[in-house]
Amino acid sequence: VIIDDSIVRGTTLKKSIIKILDRLHPKKIIIVSSAPQIRYPDCYGIDMAKLGDFIAFRAALELLKDTNQYHIVEEVYANCLSQKHFDDIEISNKVTAIYAPFTDAQISDKIAEMLKTKDINAEVEIIYQSVENLHKACPNHLGDWYFTGDYPTPGGNRVVNDAFINFYEGSDARAY
């Protein structure tokens, strides 16, 4: 069992940590994240601007493919575009629909599957802190928008929708 403060992209886990741990021949590797799944850009401080970088986002996309619901991606794109010229106060986060069909556990399981390469023998499990339990642990600090998509300012909704448009259109541009 290892503990990580957060799992954003999953790159270090996939390319290094899981391989190192697997050399010890464990039956199972459990990775516990003290943060919930990072699903949305943080335009208020931490450099997390591109949705396609987030392992939770990529896992949700894979689940949409696996369950023949990828049409949701097209719908989210259309909904984001439809709000492009709205005033910030009128914009809502349309990207939440990407995650809506799935439980946190389903997304965590898909992340574990994506992080386990063919050369890993151990079973890999990812356990994330829940948003609810994060709020219990830190009741006076509700800065959870990169987990929930509930931005504290209207501009955050514009950023997440623009980030999705950039992702969908294959642009490497930052949304902020």
Image: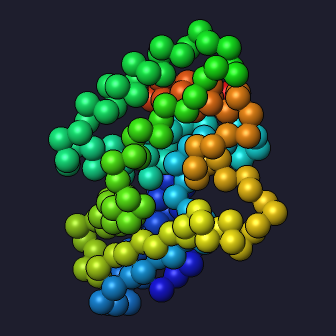
Residue 8: where, in percent of width, then height? 54, 55
Q: Is residue 171 visible?
A: no
The one of 160 and 141 positioned closer to us in this rendering: 141
Q: How is the image coloured?
A: rainbow
- For residue 105, say whether it is visible: yes
Percent x, y for residue 154? 70, 29
Residue at the limit of the structure toward the top, as seen here: 85
* Residue 18 relative to residue 116: left or right: right
Q: Nearer the viewer, residue 25 or 42?
A: 42
- Residue 161 quadrant: top right
Q: Nearer the viewer, residue 86 or 123?
A: 86
Q: Residue at x 52, y 82 (%)?
A: 2
Q: Relative to 104, say whether 25 is above or below.
A: below
Task: Locate residue 86: give its quadrant.
Answer: top right
Residue at 49 percent across and 31 percent down: it is: 94
Residue at horizontal 67 percent and vertical 33 percent from the top: 156
Q: Nearer the viewer, residue 75 or 20?
A: 75
Q: Position of residue 34 (x, y in %)?
A: 60, 71
